[in-house]
Image: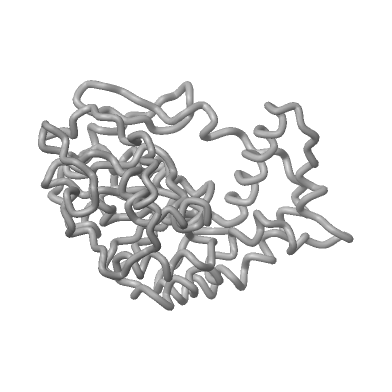
Amino acid sequence: MQSPPIPSRPAEGGKDDWRQPLSPTFSSSMTPTDNGTSIHPNGTFQQLPSIIIIGVRKGGTRALIEMLSLHSTVAAAENEVHFFDWESHFQKGIPWYLSQMPFALPNQLTVEKTPAYFTSSKVPQRIHHMNPNIKLLLILRDPTERVLSDYTQVFYNRLQKHKHYQSIESVLVKDGEINLGYKALNRSMYHMHLQNWLRYFPLKSIHVVDGDKLIKYPFPEIKRVERFLNLEPQINASNFYFNKTKGFYCLRDHGRERCLHDSKGRAHPHVAPAILHKLYRVFHEPNRKFFELVGRTFNWN
């Protein structure tokens, strides 16, 4: 059964009693009638997520949630909610967060993705406060490639807004060495951010998705996610086809084909080999520490 075509982001409620602080007594087992959200006539309702894709930015989170949505028991939030990392949203309380969730059938699991969660220091504790048993998905790419992708997104955003932009070399290099103050570089220091999450969640609650493999070989990688979430096997190889024009895999769902937005998969700017080599050296030790944390290695650098 597929989720009915109901808007996944209803209009925000304006009642003052919705702006409540996060309550440890509120759990995802509560029914919509417990918190002021009405059940839809067709039997669907909004529920707190039991799965959150926490990051990382430019790691492939959009591809992951689209692929996960192929499963009939998954109801995915349409947009990034930014509840736990944006104070303006967090202060509105759990009822507001609930209002941003899609309408789901009773047998469905709700998932939301906000890539900025992974690198926000206050988010792990806040999510743990809401649900200590939640399943977390973390999709990562080669940290160097992720930095270049991060820059590319900012570059095109500024270009479209006719704003000044800096060259890749000017943000990556400072006084002849890699600029460790560059925010995109910090986001790729995976071990540092994961250590913060492991203060609140056991490693068994966090599944690390190989974003590089998800691009090249999506089917086996999404099957690992399916098993981690204890979902009935549904997604199969026929759900994926390679689009030669776009240069990456697209999805086929009940005869309907869809691809990621054209902003995905953009070519990265050319970077001098000497700078790339310095980047690889910077990430060598952080990568080793990350591999130790998760007990597995990735084909990075």
Image quarter (top left, top right, bottom left or bottom right) of the N terminus: top left
Q: Residue 142: image x %, image y %?
A: 54, 55
Q: Residue 226: image x %, image y %?
A: 23, 52
Residue most extreme to the front:
16
Q: Residue 228: image x %, image y %?
A: 24, 59
Instruction: Determine the residue positioned at 75% across, 50% down.
Output: 273
The residue lying toward the viewer, choosing from 296 and 194, is 194
Instruction: Determine the residue positioned at 25% across, 33% down.
Output: 239
Residue most extreme to the right:
175
Number of numbered discs: 0
The residue lying toward the viewer, choosing from 279 and 87, is 87
Query: What is the basis of the colouring in this image?
Result: one colour
Q: In this view, does 97 lie to the left or right of 35?
A: right
Image quarter (top left, top right, bottom left or bottom right) of the C terminus: bottom right
The residue lying toward the viewer, choosing from 275 and 50, is 50
Q: Is residue 274 left or right of residue 246?
A: right
Q: Is residue 138 left or right of residue 193?
A: left
Q: In which quarter of the image is residue 21?
A: bottom left
Q: Residue 118: image x %, image y %?
A: 49, 60
Instruction: Determine the residue positioned at 43% across, 67% down.
Output: 124
Instruction: Determine the residue positioned at 62% across, 54% down.
Output: 144
Q: In which quarter of the image is residue 252?
A: top left
Q: Is residue 141 left or right of residue 136?
A: right
